[in-house]
Amino acid sequence: VHREANRVCWYGKAVDGAAQRPYLLTQIALPADPDGDSALRTTARIIRMSETMGLLCPGAVATVVDAVEDNGTLWIVTDWIDGTPRGELLAQEGTFNYVRAARVGLELLDVLEAAHGQGITHGELSPGQVFVRDRGSVVVTGFGLAGATLMGRPMAQMPYGSGGDLFIETHGLAGATAYARSLVIYEDEEVLAELAQRCRQQEFPPGSVIASFGSRAAEVHLLAHGRVEKV
């Protein structure tokens, strides 16, 4: 179905029933785990996150049926998704028109905002984990994988072009703008202007506290210049 760094998705069917129900099988390489405890925690977390996100965003998050580890490989079984991975769509169809790009970007933002409201981060969002249905709605996969796989967490690469990572999770509406721009032809500026109206520029003097641990954040900050320090 789809292949990207450290991740291969397969089409499969159940063999223990007459219905031959289709499933999406995702194969992911895991780092070395001598005692096996990390793999057990990862599989349990993936199933738990799927259940939680399914309640928060019905129909917009893939339903995990099972997750198992076998010889250093993680296999995630989800209900079949009637859509196409975003990376495959761009390869097949090229850039989206601005209306479709805005719809996809904002629907993805809705899912991530709902997750963040419950203290859940995706952590490994990539083009292959955003499925776009024919009617335009999105389905997100991969919740519960953060920090468990061989992939790092790129935090400084902009998503322009078909191969870039999605930065809506870390940059909120600014990320949605950048994500939309990665889907459209660059001269389509209407959607970018509309999204930009929901962002504002602000300067913080030295020593300002932007966010504190344990407090619910009302805003997402995209650092344009300067640096921040965790204390």
Image (cartoon, helix red, strand yellow):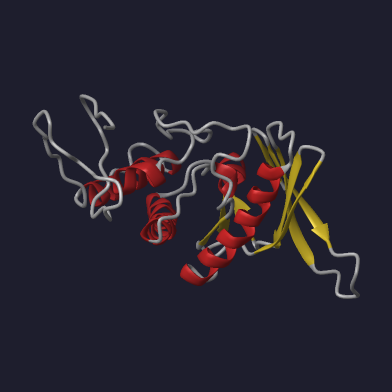
Residue 94's x, y, as percent?
Answer: 53, 41
Say whether residue 180 is left or right of residue 15.
left
Residue positioned most to the left: 205
Q: Is residue 93 visible?
A: no
Say whether residue 187 is left or right of residue 69.
left
Q: Is residue 106 above or below residue 35?
A: below
Q: Is residue 199 above or below residue 203?
A: below
- Closest to the observer, 111 or 218: 218
Residue positioned most to the bottom: 18
Residue 148's x, y, as percent?
Answer: 60, 40
- Closest to the observer, 177 or 117: 117
Q: Is residue 15 above or below residue 75?
A: below
Q: Is residue 198 above or below residue 230?
A: below
Say whether residue 10 is left or right of residue 86.
right
- Closest to the observer, 166 or 99: 166
Q: Residue at x 49, y 43 (%)?
A: 123
Q: Residue at x 21, y 52 (%)?
A: 198
Q: Quadrant of the C terminus?
A: top left
Q: Residue at x 48, y 42 (%)?
A: 95
Q: Is residue 220 visible?
A: yes
Residue 12 in which image quadrant:
bottom right
Residue positioned most to the top: 226
Residue 202's x, y, as percent?
Answer: 12, 39
Total tally of numbered discs in the picture:
0
Residue 131 in which image quadrant:
bottom right
Residue 34's x, y, as percent?
Answer: 74, 33
